[in-house]
Every structure is written in C-alpha cells, then in structure tokens.
Amino acid sequence: MLYDISTYRIVRAKTADDGYIEKHSHGAYFHYMYILNGSGRIIIDGHELEVSKYDLVMAPPGIEHEIFGKNELIKLDIKFAAGDPLYRDLLRCGYYIHGLSSYEDKLMRDMFDEAVNALPMYSYAIDSKLLELLCLILRRDKRGIEMITRARKSNDFLPDTDNISGSKLEPAVNYIKQHINKNISIAELAEHIGYSESYFSTAFKRCTGYAPNKYINILKIEKAKELIMYTPSSITAIADELGFESVHYFSKVFKQITGISPTNYVDRSSLDMIVNVLKNEPSLPPEDRYEIPVKHISERSSNNFS
C-alpha cells in the first residue's frame, strides 16, 4: 500500500478553563487535535493558536506543543504513525486548519464512533477513515485553498439521500430533519407532500431503501449518539427530547440500530475516554505514561506562564 498508516490511540478529553497540558512532544507518532466544543490556546513549535470548534491542530513527531483550556475545551485526539511517503507529505503540511468541512468533521466523529463500538475490524475502519481525512488535508494543502467537498454519503450507517435530492420526496426528508425532536407520523409526512399514506410509504422505500419509520429512527439515533457524546444529558432526557414514547422503546431502537444499548454507549463514550486501537504494540510507551496529565494553572509559576 502506497500510503501506510496505523492509528494507535483515540482520546476524547475535556480541559477545564484553568487546566493545561504541559509542553511535550511525541517521537514516534503524529498527534492531531480536533476541537469538538469550547475553545482554548495551543502553542505548537512556538506558534500560539487560539482554537475553537471545528479547528484542527496537527503536531508532527518531535514537535513540542502545550494545551490550555478555555470555555470548557473538549477535543478529540488522534494518534497515529505513517510510513513513507505519507510521513514526508504530512511533514510538509502546516500545523493548523481553521474549520474542517462538514464531511471532514463527520470523518473525525466516525473514527471515534468506530472506536467506541469496537465492532469486528474496527481498527481497519478507523485507518480507512483517517487515510481519507489525510488525503483531503493534503489536497487542501497543495491547492492552497479551502476544499469544497461534494455532498456524499457520510458513512455506511446513515441513509444515502442522493436519490431524494430534487425528487418529490425531498420536502418530506427535509421535514423529518427539521422536526427530528418530534414524534413524526407517516400520515403527517404523506399529507405534507400530498400523497396517500400507502403510496408515500411505497415511494419512500423505493427511493431510499428504508421504510419511513426506519429512516426516521436512524436519524434520531444518530442525533442521540451526538447528544450522548457531547452533552451531559441523561438517557431519559435524550429519549424525551427526541420524541420517543418511553425510554424503554428508545433503548430498544438504539440497540437495534447500533448493536449496543445506550447505557453501554454512555459508558464507552464518557469524557476523558481513551481507546487503544492497536493493543500490545511493543513500540508504544506503557499506558500510564502515554497520556500527558492535565494540570492546573495554579501549579505553574507566574514566571513560566505565557
């Protein structure tokens, strides 16, 4: 394979306003830091960056960086090794991208989702998504402009809406997305575009491959996963917010679609979560020395604070 990568670890962690991670570097792997929420300050190779949601900071092997929390910084760290020639190509990239595209953002979140679910061959799926992200970054770097990505299927989980765009069913799909927090009925959707219920259900499944209720539930569960990962909402509150008749029914649908219960998903995707993608890798430091601990500003002397 021309471009060879190995994802070692994925970390989602929160750095409070008074928290910081001291200056350090990694000798063997790249450390990509993607801002999920909040903001912060990252100093990399002497360059001070104010970062916020959707920003990506890229620390190559051997480059010193330190991280300061601000506004409850939450970031996703991807740590990986790359073989030549990808290694050399990535070294020529800058350290910072201000605002990933929506598709690039989805790739980042999908990698974490794969790590959380840990389904068979998940490490290969993560490497595949990471490689696609790196290709987009390299194209952006070579063109010197913001990449404009075509609308594509985000992953194998979400329904493909390519067949809906421009069709008579598009207003119904838009209605579902705009009212995802409600208990949406087939009758409601059919009436919205002037179809009978039976004709609407048949046309919708023929066009999308999904029965309307299945399609609605897939989008609801995707939204639920986002709420679980990035908000403090309880499972009961999320079920209620997304219009499920009960938390029991929500749990049943969640497990049918994702393969695990929402409770297990909460446990696996809790803040400060570390997922070892490659296990028993002899070239990696022991786990207790792999992550640099978060400290507090009060621990730094005023002379050292910058």
Image: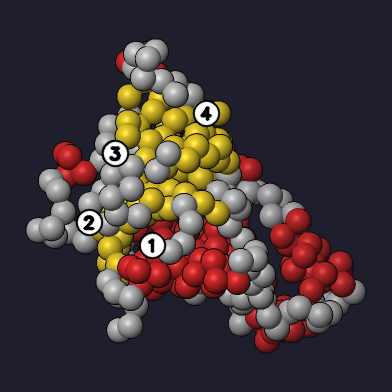
Between disc 4 and disc 3, the foreground one is: 3
Mark 3 near mark 1, Cβ–Cβ under 8 Å? no
Q: CA distance from mark 3 to mark 1?
A: 18 Å
The residue under the point 51% across, 51% down is 96
Under mark 1, the amino acid is Leu
Q: CA distance from mark 4 to mark 3?
A: 19 Å
Q: Which mark is residue 91?
A: 1
Mark 4 near mark 3, Cβ–Cβ under 8 Å? no
Between disc 4 and disc 1, the foreground one is: 1
The residue under the point 39% across, 28% down is 20
Quarter of the N terminus within the rendering: bottom left
Secondary-structure class at tag 2 = loop
Under mark 3, the amino acid is His
Q: Which residue is mark 4?
A: 70
Q: CA distance from mark 4 to mark 1?
A: 28 Å
Q: Which residue is mark 2?
A: 28
